[in-house]
Amino acid sequence: MERGRRKVRVGVVVSDAREKTVTVEVRDVKRHPKYGKTIPVRTRFHVHDEENSAHVGDTVQIVETRP
């Protein structure tokens, strides 16, 4: 199994209210397909955190896994 093909994203923890789960917001910039203007895009991921070690404001690196 090659781990190099998994997407790695860096984001900021925006919520740690749940048990063993945090919400991570990943910010990115993409270009509008027609006009070419850069548009900020934010995506939120619900991430498993076994030790409850991440808190709001922490910068974390997340890696995708198989479902």
Image (tube, rainbow, N blue to C red):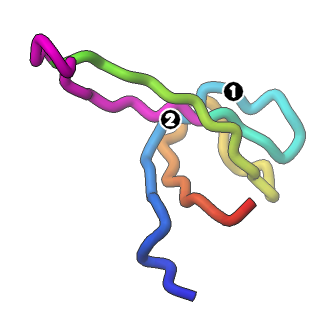
Give the vertical position of 59 relative to 50 (above or below).
Answer: above
Residue 23 in the image: state x and y as whole percent: 67, 33
Q: Which residue is mark 1?
A: 15
Quadrant of the drawing holding the N terminus: bottom right
**Rendered residue at 58%/29% (across/down):** 44
Question: Outermost residue toward the right?
Answer: 19
For label 1, the SS is strand
Q: The disc labelled 2 sits on which kind of residue?
A: Val
| Residue 33 included in the magenta stretch of the image | yes
**Rendered residue at 44%/24% (across/down):** 42
Residue 59 in the image: state x and y as whole percent: 48, 42
Q: Which residue is mark 2?
A: 12
For label 2, the SS is strand
Residue 63 in the image: state x and y as whole percent: 55, 60
Q: The disc labelled 1 sits on which kind of residue?
A: Ser
Give the vertical position of 59 relative to 27 (above or below).
Answer: below
Quadrant of the drawing holding the C terminus: bottom right
**Rendered residue at 60%/26% (across/down):** 14
**Rendered residue at 81%/58% (across/down):** 50
| Residue 47 included in the magenta stretch of the image | no
Q: Is residue 26 left or right of residue 56?
A: left
Magenta region = 24-37
